[in-house]
Amino acid sequence: MTYEAPHKAVILARGLGSRMRKEAEGVALNDEQSKAAEAGVKAMISVGRPFLDHVITALADANFTDVCLVIGPEHDMIRDYYDTVDKQRVTISYAVQEEPLGTANAVLAAEEFAGDDRVLVINSDNYYPAEALESLATVPGSALVGFTREGMLTKSNIAPERLAAFALATADEQGNLAELVEKPDQDAIERLGQDAVISMNCWLCSPAIFDAARAIPKSARGEYEITDAVRRAIDDGDPYFVVKADVGVLDLSNRGDIASVVEALGDREARL
């Protein structure tokens, strides 16, 4: 099947934010930040503007102009803000994931939004540079953006010891995803080799992802995982091309990340 250049993005913003709720020693938040942190809504942490504004700005810069936020039924903070904020470059809609049953289940909530189009699927607590997202424009099918270790070590705010726990991906001779290892141990890191890239949950998914998400069982964590859905989609005949990006992703998982995100974003303007 031939697809148009992708323009739809699904942002997974349903997480419980358990790590963000926890106090962090030596980290003082302002009132606005505290409100979002205590609610566990990481994406709405203020870094001058809500962090999610910067995530969406990068999407718009990369020509992803139709955005769907997957939220929980209790996430009025997100709805109230995006229903009223000025938007000139993007349209924003919502899909409700009734229960926090995992990332694949969250993607299913956006099936109507996706329709027959491919959708970019990303986390709400990660800032993906526009140049990485733009690299997906010429991919004909499904894809994964794989971030180089050097790019992540030098251009992200993630400490090397934390980075070591992130999923690693390898490509076959055609450039398609061959292996995806989550939380790799040292043996796996050595086996996968220097060409392995880091997965930061930046996926371009064809509609095949929805049948795959319905077909998978729960993981050991008791959730439906997007990585399992991608593996199932590949097994069912929908390969995922690995697009390498030599850039860093900003991570806003806990309160200790806020200062480094503010520093990395600097005076970057958010334009929705």
Image (cartoon, rainbow, N blue to C red):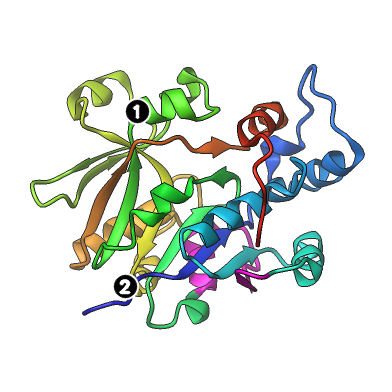
Choose mark 1 or mark 2, whichever is in front.
1
Q: Residue at x 54, y 53 (%)?
A: 58
Left-right relation of 160 to 51: left
| Range of residues picked out in magenta | 88-110
Quadrant assignment for the N terminus: bottom left
Which residue is situated farthest in the right direction here?
31
> Which kind of residue does numbered mark 1 sit on?
Arg
Q: Earlier in the sequence, mark 1 or mark 2?
A: 1
Residue 165 at least partly seen: no
User: Which image quarter: residue 157?
Assistant: top right
Q: Position of residue 242 (x, y in %)?
A: 25, 49
CB contact under 8 Å: marks 1 and 2: no
> Which kind of residue does numbered mark 2 sit on?
Ala
Q: Residue at x 35, y 28 (%)?
A: 149
Count the labels in the image: 2
Left-right relation of 198 to 222: left
Q: Residue at x 76, y 32 (%)?
A: 22
User: Which image quarter: residue 19?
Assistant: top right
Q: Residue at x 71, y 27 (%)?
A: 259
Q: Position of residue 152 (x, y in %)?
A: 42, 30
Above or below, 11 against 192 in this view is below
Q: Position of residue 123 (x, y in %)?
A: 54, 51
In what element is the residue under mark 2?
helix
Residue 89 on the magenta span: yes
**Residue carrying label 1:** 149
Q: CA distance from mark 1 to mark 2?
A: 30 Å
User: Which image quarter: residue 183?
Assistant: top left
Above or below, 182 against 114 in this view is above
**Residue carrying label 2:** 208
Q: How many residues crowd around disc 2 within 10 Å: few (fewer than 14), some, or many (20 or more)?
A: some
In what element is the residue under mark 1?
helix
Q: Position of residue 112 (x, y in %)?
A: 51, 81
